Image (cartoon, grey):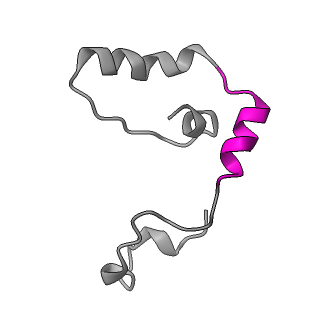
Amino acid sequence: MKFHVQRNVVVLPKSVTPSRIKENIQLFDFELSEEDMGKIRSMNKNWRGFPAPWVAKHKHYPFNTEY
């Protein structure tokens, strides 16, 4: 989550467990280094984990947009 937040990407975590909620909030207590950010970015394999091909022609299908 921190990687995305640090890139100004909205993250919508879901939790009902108090300890997990606390962990989610703690992501604002630190920064990832440029080296860490670069390592995470380097894991990009240019594929999506859930492309949902059966709706790919729908006008609101979000995965046709490059990221």
Q: Residue at x 32, y 21 (%)?
A: 20
Q: Vertical placement of 66 versus 43: above or below?
A: below
Query: Left or right: where does residue 63 sit relative to residue 42?
Result: left
Q: Residue at x 60, y 69 (%)?
A: 66
Residue 37 horizontal side relative to residue 50, left or right: right
Of residue 16 and residue 58, the one placed in the foreground of this image is 16
Position in image of residue 59 (x %, y %):
38, 80
Most distant residue in the left direction:
16
Can residue 33 be found in the magenta stretch?
yes
Question: Magenta stretch?
Answer: 31-43
Q: Which residue appears at 21% of the width and 25% of the height?
A: 16
Residue at position x 40%, y 73% from top? 61
Q: Is residue 16 above or below residue 44?
A: above
Q: Is residue 1 left or right of residue 7?
A: left
Report which quarter residue 40 is drawn in. top right
Q: Is residue 66 above or below residue 17?
A: below
